[in-house]
Image (cartoon, rainbow, N blue to C red):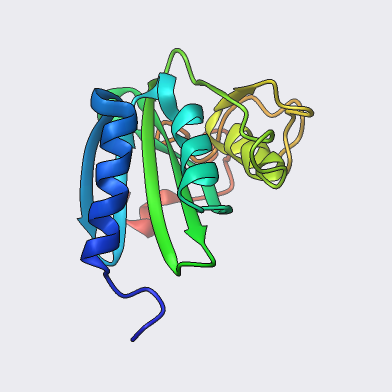
Amino acid sequence: MPAFAINAERDLLVTEQLGAAFGDRILKSEQQGDMLCFTVRKDSIHEVLAFLKDKLDLTFLTTLCGMHYADRDTLGLVIHLHSMRNGHRIRLKTETPLKDPVFPTFTDLWPASNWMEREAFDFFGLRFTGHPDLRRILNMEDFPAFPLRKDYPLEDPTREDKDDSYFGR
């Protein structure tokens, strides 16, 4: 059996336990490929993650990254968790308005989220309250924008050395 084969019984158990513990704070659950995915209310994300880590043995934080939904003026946060013992992975998603891109830090649950949160801050502008050292990680400190947002220009508008007519523009 492949390492990440769909296990309907286990996925149903996780879904039921999350539903029982958090009710309507779990906005959506779905199977995407071989991964069970949950959409969680922003104000409950830290509590849900602590539950998954402590009660359901999803102890390894694989990914924490941002998303930008330009058509909705919304930023998203995507988190992948893995249970090494059970060979189980899940994805959690939550959203926040572009005007209020603040989440609690997850460094109290996973110290390794420090760098992932800094990257999400640097590229998307997501802020994490309680973070021990939230500053840019790859861009200059005084960089005025967030380059992975969809509103960031692809070209430098001040360049005069480039003739766009060669590129069909």
The image position of residue 48, as x and y in percent, is 44, 33
Q: Is residue 146 above or below residue 129?
A: below
The image position of residue 122, as x and y in percent, is 63, 35
Q: Residue at x 27, y 52 (%)?
A: 13
The image position of residue 99, as x and y in percent, is 44, 13
Q: Nearer the viewer, residue 100 or 153?
A: 100
**Quadrant that contains the N terminus:** bottom left
Q: Residue at x 73, y 28 (%)?
A: 134
**The furthest residue to the top:** 99
Q: Is residue 111 above or below residue 62?
A: above
Q: Nearer the viewer, residue 150 or 100?
A: 100
Question: Which image quarter: residue 67?
Answer: top left
The image position of residue 87, as x and y in percent, is 45, 69
- Numbered-mark total: 0
Q: Residue at x 61, y 32 (%)?
A: 121
Q: Nearer the viewer, residue 40 or 154?
A: 40
12 with respect to 4 (left or right): left
149 with respect to 142 (left or right): left
Q: Is residue 19 visible?
A: yes
21 with respect to 81 (left or right): left
10 with respect to 101 (left or right): left
Q: Is residue 153 visible?
A: no
Q: Nearer the viewer, residue 1 or 153?
A: 1
Q: Is residue 136 above or below residue 65?
A: above
